[in-house]
Image (spheres, rainbow, N blue to C red):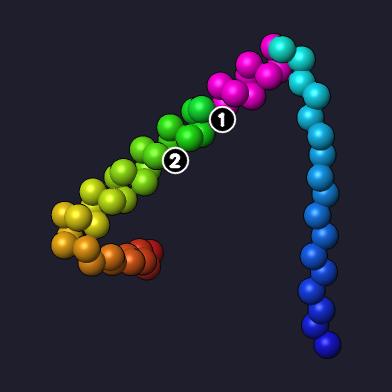
Amino acid sequence: MVGVVIQAYRFALDPTSVQDQALRSHCGAQRFAYNWGLQRIRANLEQRGGRAFLRIDRG
């Protein structure tokens, strides 16, 4: 018998002003990187005419 256990934890953050500034900076950088990657994927799909390909290198 196989069971699945789902458990979650919730934490409250109380950063100092310096830590808050660092967290906001990191979140902004993450958002920039995500949007940059998403733009690259969309441009690639548009170039291929909307067809997506999955390439698996077998080395």
- Residue 4 is tagged as none
Amino acid at circle 2: Tyr
Q: Residue at x 82, y 39 (%)?
A: 11
Q: Is residue 7 above or below residue 20?
A: below
28 relative position to 3: left or right: left
Give whichever of discs 1 and 2 has the lower sequence position.
1
Residue beneath label 2, please?
A: 34
Q: Main secondary structure of the magenta part?
A: helix
Q: Quadrant of the C terminus?
A: bottom left
Instruction: Read off the magenta span.
Output: 18-27
Task: Say if the magenta span includes residue 19.
Answer: yes
Q: Residue at x 81, y 34 (%)?
A: 12
Give the alpha-carbon distance from disc 1 to disc 2, as whole Å. 10 Å
Residue at the (19%, 55%) spot, across then down: 46
At x 16% / y 62%, what residue is drawn? 49
Q: Which residue has dot 1 on it? A: 27
Residue in the foreground of this view, choosing between 28 and 58: 28
